[in-house]
Image (cartoon, rainbow, N blue to C red):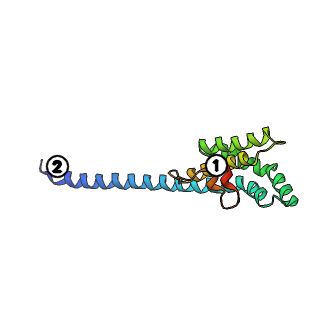
Amino acid sequence: MEFIEKILPTLLVVAAGFITWFLKDKSEKLKFQREKLIEEKRLNYEKILEPIIRVMAGVKNKAEMDKALKQIQSFDYKKSAFQLMLFGSDSVVNAYNDYFQYLYKNESNLDPYKMLNALGKVILEIRKDLGNDKTALKEYDMLRFMITDIEKMKE
């Protein structure tokens, strides 16, 4: 009995320390994996948005437009889009798909405001997925820095 009274408290302290260390280690590993996934998503989102940004930047430059189209048709872009389908949040995947479906269905008759609203939705959902999920910004806010008559999108 004396043995239990002397050793048990020490064993309990050691066991509690081991359990605490184990849980903290597991928590840190999960946090590291989450951070790594967010960084990989961010890099993939950049790849996905690059040709779209190129189009926006080169609207009056045919060479830039052709380069963006070639980039969208490339194997690397298709691979990045496939990774988006696997690792992107549901809302990002849906917004991306809606954007491209709008482009496909209205290729010859694009409404620039609907197209920009769909693009703004993609960017906004990416923003939320990367940690700004409580943002109060709207789709058009994501494009205000580059479009002079953006207020028309609100209507």
Q: Residue at x 20, y 53 (%)?
A: 9
Residue 134 visible (yes or no):
yes
Q: Position of residue 115 (x, y in %)?
A: 73, 47
**Residue 68 lies in quadrant:** bottom right
Residue type, numbered disc 1:
Lys
Residue 37 visible (yes or no):
no
Circle 2 crowding by C-alpha within 10 Å: few under 14, some 14–19, many from 20? few
Q: Residue at x 14, y 51 (%)?
A: 5
**Residue behind mark 1:** 154
Indicate whether 151 appears above or below 103.
below
Circle 1 crowding by C-alpha within 10 Å: few under 14, some 14–19, many from 20? few
| SS at badge 1 | helix
Q: Earlier in the sequence, mark 2 or mark 1?
A: 2
Indicate whether 76 appears above or below 103.
below
Residue type, numbered disc 2:
Ile
In three-dimensional space, the C-alpha distance between marks 2 and 1, rounded to whole angstroms, equals 74 Å
Q: Nearer the viewer, residue 133 or 140?
A: 140
Residue found at the very far top of the displayed protein: 105
Q: Position of residue 137 (x, y in %)?
A: 56, 53
Please report contact status of discs 2 and 1: CB closer than 8 Å, yes or no: no
**Residue 86 lies in quadrant:** top right
Q: Residue at x 16, y 49 (%)?
A: 4
Frontmost of labels 2 and 1 is: 1
Q: Residue at x 81, y 53 (%)?
A: 71
Q: Nearer the viewer, residue 87 or 133?
A: 133
**Residue behind mark 2:** 4
**Residue 143 lies in quadrant:** bottom right
Q: Is residue 74 left or right of residue 130?
A: right
- Counting labels gives 2
Q: Position of residue 7 (x, y in %)?
A: 19, 53
